[in-house]
Image (cartoon, rainbow, N blue to C red):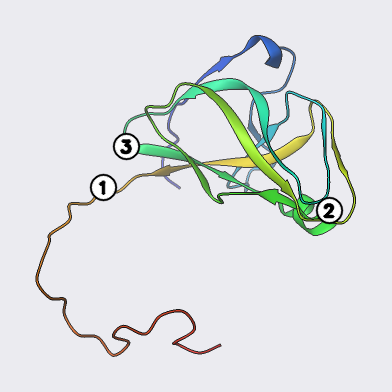
Amino acid sequence: MTAPITIALKRLPHGEGLPPPAYATTGAAGMDVVSAEATTLAPGARAAIATGFAIAIPTGYEVQVRPRSGLALKYGVTCLNTPGTIDSDYRGEVKVILINLGTEPFEIARGDRIAQLVPAPVQRAVLDVVESLDDTPRGTGGFGSTGR
């Protein structure tokens, strides 16, 4: 296991009294994050759900926003843009984009666990514009070209 990084967390006024993101178990990869608001997601609806905090991620890292598997399996509620990326230079409120793919309205109460946050290192790239690319056995075969 690599050493943990430190991420500064600023509690916003509407997040007072809520727990900060936290690992549920010693083996958890993601920190559970809770909703700072109560709302209902109708079937097919999506919304950016407030968490009541902002963070300062160290340069060279991102924080990925990922769905909770229990919400997906039991209710059909998941995160859009998964995994979402919170960049190291963003200082606004963390929000979670949820969608209800289920058939029933989904109630979100203040304090409900709605997503997971996973810090990750960022590898930057330099693009080299060239006239041609090397050949591979796959070549230009796209979606589904390698079989089912």
Q: Which residue is mark 3?
A: 60
Position of 82 with respect to 60 (left or right) is right
Q: Measured from the top left, where is residue 102 in percent x and y?
A: 82, 56
What residue do we see at 76% from left, 24% from top? 37
- Real-space Cα separation, disc 2 to disc 3, in angstroms: 35 Å
What is the count of numbered marks? 3
Q: Which residue is mark 2?
A: 75
> Is the C-beta separation of discs 2 and 1 under 8 Å?
no
What residue do we see at 16% from left, 80% from top? 134
Residue sitting farthest toward the top: 13
What residue do we see at 62% from left, 13% from top? 12
**Who comes first in sequence, dot 2 or dot 1?**
2
User: Which image quarter holds the C terminus?
Assistant: bottom right
Task: Name the element at disc 1.
Answer: loop
Quadrant of the rendered image containing residue 20: top right
From the viewer's perspective, is the residue at label 2 or at label 3 nearer? Answer: 2
Q: From the viewer's perspective, is residue 66 above or below residue 37?
A: below
Q: Label 3: how many residues lie within 10 Å, few (<14), some (14-19) or many (20+)? A: few
Q: Which residue is mark 1?
A: 124
Q: Measured from the top left, where is residue 58 in percent x and y?
A: 37, 29
Q: Nearer the viewer, residue 98 or 123?
A: 98
What residue do we see at 75% from left, 45% from top? 45
Report the amino acid beneath label 2: Tyr
Quadrant of the rendered image containing residue 87: top left
**Who comes first in sequence, dot 2 or dot 3?**
3
- Real-space Cα separation, disc 1 to disc 3, in angstroms: 9 Å
**Who comes first in sequence, dot 1 or dot 3?**
3
Position of 117 with respect to 40 (left or right) is left
Q: Measured from the top left, where is residue 71 in percent x and y?
A: 78, 50
Task: Name the element at disc 2.
Answer: helix
